[in-house]
Amino acid sequence: MILMKETLRQLFLAALEDLSLRRVMNAKIKCREGVLCWGEEQIELERYKKIVTIAIGKAAFQMAEVFAETVRPRTAAGLAVSSLSPPHHPDFETYQGGHPYPNLESVQAAERALETLSDLEPHHLVVYLLSGGGSAICEKPISDEISIDHLREFYRVLVTCGANIVQMNVLRKHFSAIKGGRLAERAFPARQVSFYVSDVPPEQPSTVASGPTMPDESTVGDTIEIAEKLGIVESLPASIRGFFRDRRIPETPKPGHEAFHGNSWFCLLDNHDGLNRLEHQVRSEGWVLETDISVDDWPLERAVDHLLARLRELRSNNPGRTVALLTGGELSCPVIGDGQGGRNQAFVLDCVEKIAGDTIAVVSAGTDGVDGNSPATGAVADGSTLERAQLSSLDPGDFARRSDSYHFFERLQDDLTTGPTGNNVRDLRLLVAW
């Protein structure tokens, strides 16, 4: 079982390597003889006196560097804001925003982006490079009534209440000066193109980085309904509660707004790409493989029970064969303690007692290299994990109650730690039985 656990670790790492953002951008965005091409679209760069580039998200620095190389000798100056330590780049102002909660540089970067996009003309081209984490990394509250401390508390409540990414970003959009299409509104009438790496459900592209360049389908009514359904209104900081109480939450620009006329949006990578890369790795092992993405956004324990039942059924139907179940997306995992961990390690921790003594191994990890508030991106476990934990006096239930999945797996040396990858196409999970 130790060998199988290590195999799962290596399969995930190989898939991660295949998701290299530089490789993907070079393959999907071309510039030939002054014509920028992507998908089925193209524009002649000579028509534009200036190219402004705004890169936001965990992959911002890498995306900005690759795009600048792509359009040379044209200059694509602008700003890039990521949660990583900023490199020096001659064409970009760089900022290190906060994640999962905004910091002062998040606000400074958002203010600078709004300044950069002011007073543009139709002969200007704005290129946005968007990736996961952008909601917190670059942010400015919709009103000066909301302080940076209240903004951070707002984000903390959203991150820890068990809301899914779509629900969180509906709320974020309506309290942001740059999200929900407001950057595009500021840049109008310039020509605008967005290249994005999606860390959200594929049918919700305007949720990437809370959709600063896309029309917002959600409404103020949705914002109020979600907050009330989650039961968080009274937990929000006073300045934000006031907007709910007085029903003065401002609306975001909608589909059909003039700011989006002629704009283009192109997805470079999403969770399906991650699943495809991992599937390719798994098929090289010769295992019986099925994919089940039905659990996306499910509560964690319900997803674990469903996937383990499906895996055992798959094994029963294929006697003598190694079988694998592949899944992705994100799970709902409220934070109930003050430990370290995230939804991926919590998923594997919930599996530990349920696979004890069985020939089953599990890996769950984030493609961004960061799981929750821990230094790991995920974890691995197998049928021997519970016994090994008990020999070390580790109680998985105790660690789960404290939301401290990281230290459980770290002490067993079963954490999966890569460091930040500068990419994010949501989570990948693989369950294997033999």
Image (spheres, rainbow, N blue to C red):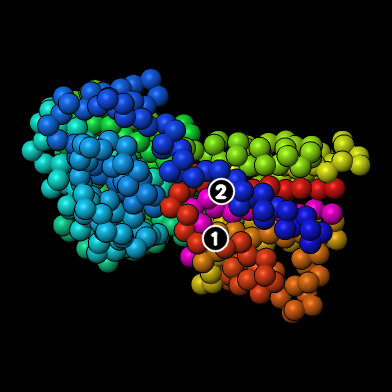
Q: Which residue is mark 1?
A: 418
Place of residue 233 in the rendered image (x, y in percent of width and height, measured from the top left): 36, 55
Residue type for callout 1 = Thr
Q: Which residues are magenta?
A: 359-373
Q: Is residue 89 left or right of residue 288?
A: left
Residue type for callout 2 = Leu
Q: Secondary structure at mark 1?
A: loop
Residue 148 in magenta?
A: no
* Neighbourhood count class around disc 1 (C-alpha, 10 Å): few under 14, some 14–19, many 20 upward: some
Q: Is residue 117 left or right of residue 262?
A: left
Q: Which residue is mark 2?
A: 16
Which residue is at the far left?
119
Q: Residue at 17% of width from left, 53% of height from top?
A: 111
Q: Is residue 122 left or right of residue 326?
A: left
Q: Residue at 70% of width from left, 52% of height from top?
A: 8
Place of residue 71 in the rendered image (x, y in percent of width and height, measured from the top left): 27, 35
Which quadrant of the figure contains the N terminus?
Answer: bottom right
Q: Nearer the viewer, residue 343 or 3?
A: 3
